[in-house]
Amino acid sequence: MKKFLKRVLITLGIIIGVLALAWGGLFLKLKSSMSGFATMETGWIVDNIFVVKDDFSNIFIIQDSTQYIVIDCANTPSIVAEQMKKLGISPNDVAAVFLTHTDGDHVGALSLFDNAKLYMSKEEEQMINGTKSKFLWFSNSIPRTDYTLLEDRETLQIGSVKIECILVPGHTSGTMAYLINDIYLFTGDILSLVDGKIAPIPAIFDMDNAQALDSVDIIRHISTARYIFTSHWGYTDDFQTAVAN
């Protein structure tokens, strides 16, 4: 009995050690990949578009007269609120929030925008209802149930702002890009920008890397776009150069 117990304890020790090494390796890999982030500082970018910087991600704010539209919600409510104050923009004046996807660093400050209508892709709902998860059994979550689900290539009009919704899965099952007024393309985490060119993000961040690469190709063929805005890798005002092979 003592020998059996000893073997069990040794086996458990080995399993725990292997898991600890695996988690440690994953953490170091994530940290290394995040070191390549190039988030923008809070401020005005171009025309009626502003950017807010959180710890390591950006959210974008589109002004339409006295109301605003927000793309993604970053990670930390207190930081987002403080940065928005620098711009003189109140979360209470945000009319709509569009999520590119529901990872924590894109929904963390969602509670600031309780007055806003919330939109995300129909396929992304799988990420928050337990149907799909990015890693093992860890599902995404958001603090609201009053959201509107969007179809691929659906078009909405909010004030003078036209929003075309483009499904680009791979990073998550329902990642969606948003083309604003046919010109400004907000891509979330489906691609990065490296030296002014679009590139895949580190594969460790994607649910389905092959599908993500197909989605990057979808981006290449959006003929009217002139700008690309990413959540972690800045933006470009030269779409044609960015997507050129």
Image (cartoon, rainbow, N blue to C red):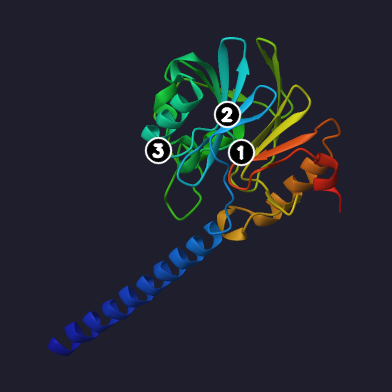
At label 1, counting other C-alpha atoms closer than 10 Å, the crowd grade (few under 14, some 14-19, many 20 or more) is many
- Say whether residue 222 is left or right of residue 48: right
Disc on the earlier residue, 3 or 1: 3
SS under mark 3: loop
Q: Residue drawn 33% across and 76% down?
A: 15
Left or right of residue 1: residue 242: right
Q: Of helix, strand and loop, which one carries label 2?
A: strand
Label 3: how many Cα within 10 Å (few below 14, some 14–19, many 20+): some
Disc 2 marks which amino acid?
Met
Q: Which residue is mark 2?
A: 120
Q: CA distance from mark 2 to mark 1?
A: 8 Å
Image coordinates of residue 122 in percent, x first then y, are 60, 30
Sequence-wise, the earlier of marks 2 and 1 is 2
Q: Do the residues bearing badges 2 and 1 touch, measured as CB atoms within 8 Å? A: yes
* Vertical position of residue 124 compared to residue 190: above or below: above
Question: Label 3 is placed on what type of residue?
Answer: Thr
Q: For this rendering, which residue is in front, 145 or 223?
A: 223
Residue 60 is labelled as: none
Within the image, what quadrant is residue 162 found in? top right
| Residue lying furthest left | 2
The percent coordinates of residue 83 (x first, y second) are 45, 31
* Residue 144 visible within the image: no
Q: Which residue is denoted by mark 3 in the rendering?
A: 76
The amino acid type, in three-letter code, at marker 1 is: Gly
Q: Nearer the viewer, residue 81 or 17?
A: 81
